[in-house]
Image: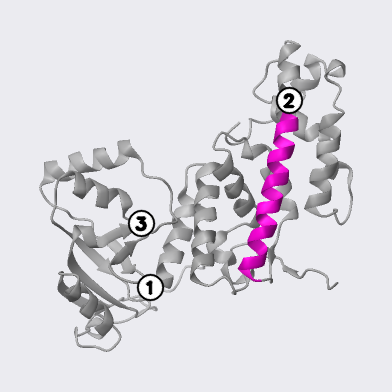
């Protein structure tokens, strides 16, 4: 059986500061007529959906064609793989928009697969305008649907905590599979950021109240993006997620027994996971993740809470992990 091929992703490099005025197009070169072939399909769809094109141009940095349009609000939907709607946020936005009486921040959209448009980053503004009863909304349309994935990747980096980041990555992953499951997982390393986030996202989907921060360092060290097709790698992530959740049940039982002995600390779960983690004793190449999780589960089942003293917990350094 051939060995599984993986590719390590390199650390993101911070771009160097460019010389002023050395990049992009001159203003005169950004002109783009709506009859241009690069946007003709978008213009046709806007008109078909009952919208109105307000203008078109080439992006002054990368030269990509863009369209500004007014669309019926019911022709735009959020991409099906982004984070959940925040009731408080969209209601607050609605209040601000109503106070100014003007919608000044167009939502970015891309053509949806069949009809209408998807917005990868305008869900709350869209819902705020719907709350105000708006008939139409201003949108900046990018003809290239791939831009949606890039925007979602940026949104994932801005997510407030590990749970939000992981869930959003999991939704992006499933969206990529729906598009074309034959593509290699490594092709989307930029969008997904970490292989560990995919597995954690699948964990959070099944168990929303989950202390993913306790397991993230282990998964991050051992999981890598694979050159196998998405239809195969998704099964691997789902299998690992099941193993992590199974381990979490064992760890939760140990935490419960420690609490029954009067040991209370925000670091209890971190402490237990650290105690059963074999990686801290391994030098050189670590074993596969599945083997590590199996070993940890066995150790959790044999964990003797009677031997743990308060001073053992006091030795834990740093704060509790995300979602602890």
Given contact means CB atoms under 8 Å apart, are the residues at marks 1 and 3 in contact?
no
The residue pinned by badge 2 equals 253
Give the distance between the C-alpha atoms of the residues marked 2 and 1, in whole angstroms: 60 Å
How far is mark 2 from mark 3, CA to CA?
A: 40 Å
- Residue 237 highlighted magenta (yes or no): yes
Return the x and y of residue 206 as percentages of the image width and height.
Answer: 58, 42
- Residue 235 lies in quadrant: bottom right
| Element at label 2 | helix
The residue sitting at 14% across, 52% down in the picture is: 134
Report the residue marked by disc 3.
121
Residue at 64% across, 71% down: 229
Label 1 or label 3, whichever lies nearer to me, is 3
Tell me the residue that label 1 is attached to.
20
The kind of secondary structure the magenta stretch mainly shows is helix
Q: In the image, which residues are magenta?
A: 229-251
- 244 horizontally vs 48: left or right: right
């Amino acid at each position: 059986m051939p060995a599984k091929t993986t590719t390590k992703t390199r650390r993101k490099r911070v771009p160097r500061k460019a010389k002023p005025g050395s990049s992009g197009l001159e203003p005169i070169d950004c002109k783009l007529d709506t009859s241009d072939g690069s946007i003709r399909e978008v213009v046709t769809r806007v008109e078909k959906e009952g919208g109105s094109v307000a203008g078109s141009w080439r992006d002054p940095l990368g030269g990509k064609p863009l369209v500004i349009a007014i669309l019926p609000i019911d022709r735009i939907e959020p991409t099906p793989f982004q984070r959940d709607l925040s009731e408080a946020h969209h209601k607050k936005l609605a209040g601000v928009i109503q106070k100014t009486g003007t919608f000044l921040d167009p939502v970015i959209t891309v053509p949806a697969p069949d009809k209408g448009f998807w917005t990868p980053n305008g869900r709350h503004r869209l819902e705020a305008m719907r709350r105000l009863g708006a008939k139409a909304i201003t949108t900046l349309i990018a003809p290239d649907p791939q831009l949606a994935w890039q925007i979602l990747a940026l949104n994932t980096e801005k997510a407030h905590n590990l749970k939000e980041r992981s869930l959003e990555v999991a939704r992006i992953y499933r969206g990529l599979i729906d598009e074309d499951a034959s593509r290699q997982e490594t092709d989307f390393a930029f969008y997904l950021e970490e292989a560990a986030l995919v597995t954690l996202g699948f964990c959070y989907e099944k168990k929303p109240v989950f202390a993913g921060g306790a397991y993230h360092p282990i998964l991050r060290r051992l999981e890598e993006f694979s050159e196998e097709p998405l239809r195969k790698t998704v099964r691997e992530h789902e299998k690992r997620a099941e193993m992590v959740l199974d381990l979490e049940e064992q760890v939760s039982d140990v935490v419960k027994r420690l609490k029954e002995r009067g040991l209370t600390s925000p670091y209890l779960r971190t402490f237990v996971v650290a105690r059963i983690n074999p990686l801290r004793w391994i030098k050189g190449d670590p074993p596969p993740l599945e083997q590590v999780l199996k070993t940890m589960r066995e150790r959790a089942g044999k964990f003797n809470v009677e031997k743990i003293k308060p001073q053992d917990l006091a030795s834990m350094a740093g704060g509790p992990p995300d979602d602890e």
